[in-house]
Amino acid sequence: MVEIKIPGVGESVTEGFLAEWSKDDGGLVALDEPILVLETDKITMTVNSPAAGRLKIQVTAGEAVEVGQVVGSINTEAADDVVARPETASAETPSADEPTGGAPSPTLTSGQEALLSPAALRLVREHSLSVEQIQGSGRDGRILKEDVLRFLANPPAEQTPPAATSPNESEAPISEAPSSSVRQTRALMSPLRKRLAQRLVEVQQNAALLTTFNEADLSRVMAVRAKLKPVFKERHGVDLGFMSFFVKAAVDALKTVPQVNGFIDDDEMVTNHYYDIGIAVSTEKGLVVPVVRDADKLSMAEIEAKVADLALRARERRLDLDDLTGAIFSISNGGVFGSLLSTPIINPPGSAILGMHTIKKRPVVVDDEIVIRPMMYLAVSYDHRLIDGREAVTFLNRIVECIEDPERMLLEV
């Protein structure tokens, strides 16, 4: 018998929230197979099985837990059953872990079963649902219990295929509204959401926040992307997005105005001379800001690959605590949601954040002529205790200069 304990995720984290079991009580699990989701005030992570065998759940999902607490166990005497168990069962014969009786079960292919969590599989069979109609929000499109419940609460009028999603998009799935017969729903705030709310309020109370705005013409960036995107992908194996341009521009601007790369520590003003850039990522559990380390030493391709990796691991709950610490300057892209303009809130202990927004074609004056250009509003929120208006405006103007003259940034293609 091997105990399942809540792992430590950092010196300051002592408790968390057992959000979800990935397997049913009594189910067979393999070594290192994901078995539970842990939420803390800093990170949401997946915990893997310490052994192969049969799972015994001792703490139900939804309960608060402490680091080191035993929440279940693995009966290793059943380890041989994990190896011997067939990957798929006959459509006519339910497995030992599945209930018999009830509504007739739909015939599922092995590929469909692999897309369903155990709880979701049970609901699909109980309600004879078509898997093709259910949009999964889990890792690699995996269908979770809440996806099935959401589908049952608001079934589509007709079968429609799920919309394709770009791998570079930063948004998390938006929860659908329940049916009109449901007048109110309640759910406990997760530790991650509660801590996020607390930090945002603390920033508003403890910092002198101001925001300065400007706009950038993205014509040349878009032209460079259109021209070099295919060869960039062929050479480096990653797509050429907008984020690498803005990270490079931010590094250039931070070198020009070092105060923006600083923070207040008691009665001292600390300035960093390295460039760790936080990239805000929206997940279904809340906003997280993983960090691109030493961005000044990375190529455009390395930045794109790192941002994509951090965003994917954030949504799959595979970030480490180290991935979320150390950024003094951050970037938030509200444009992926269609935001035209916003005032981003700084991510403590940082003192400034750049807000990107949606690109809109607008009439602008160039060389005394009115032309149509793809424009983006940019916003920099900053702590006025450390950064004066002159520095903030100079910093943002430098970013605009870099974006409007992207040839200055080496593409390495």
Image (tube, grey):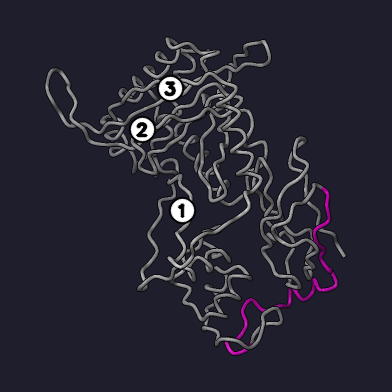
Provide the secondary structure element on which disc 1 rests.
Answer: loop
Residue at 64%, 49% (x, y): give it: 190
Type of the residue with mark 1? Ile
Gap between marks 2 and 1 measured at Cα: 20 Å
Gap between marks 3 and 2 measured at Cα: 11 Å
Quarter of the image with the N terminus in it: bottom right
Q: Which mark is residue 341?
A: 2
Earlier in the chain: of badge 3 and badge 2, it is: 3
**Pointer 1: what residue?**
174
Q: Which residues are magenta?
A: 68-93
- Number of residue marks: 3
Residue 73 magenta-highlighted: yes
> Is 223 displayed left or right of 60 in the figure?
left
Type of the residue with mark 3? Thr
Residue nearest the observer in this picture, 272 or 178: 178
Provide the secondary structure element on which disc 2 rests.
Answer: loop
Residue nearest the observer in this picture, 84 or 96: 96
Residue 268 location in percent, x, y? 66, 10
**Residue lying furthest right:** 1
> Is 122 displayed left or right of 13 in the figure?
left
**Pointer 3: what residue?**
211
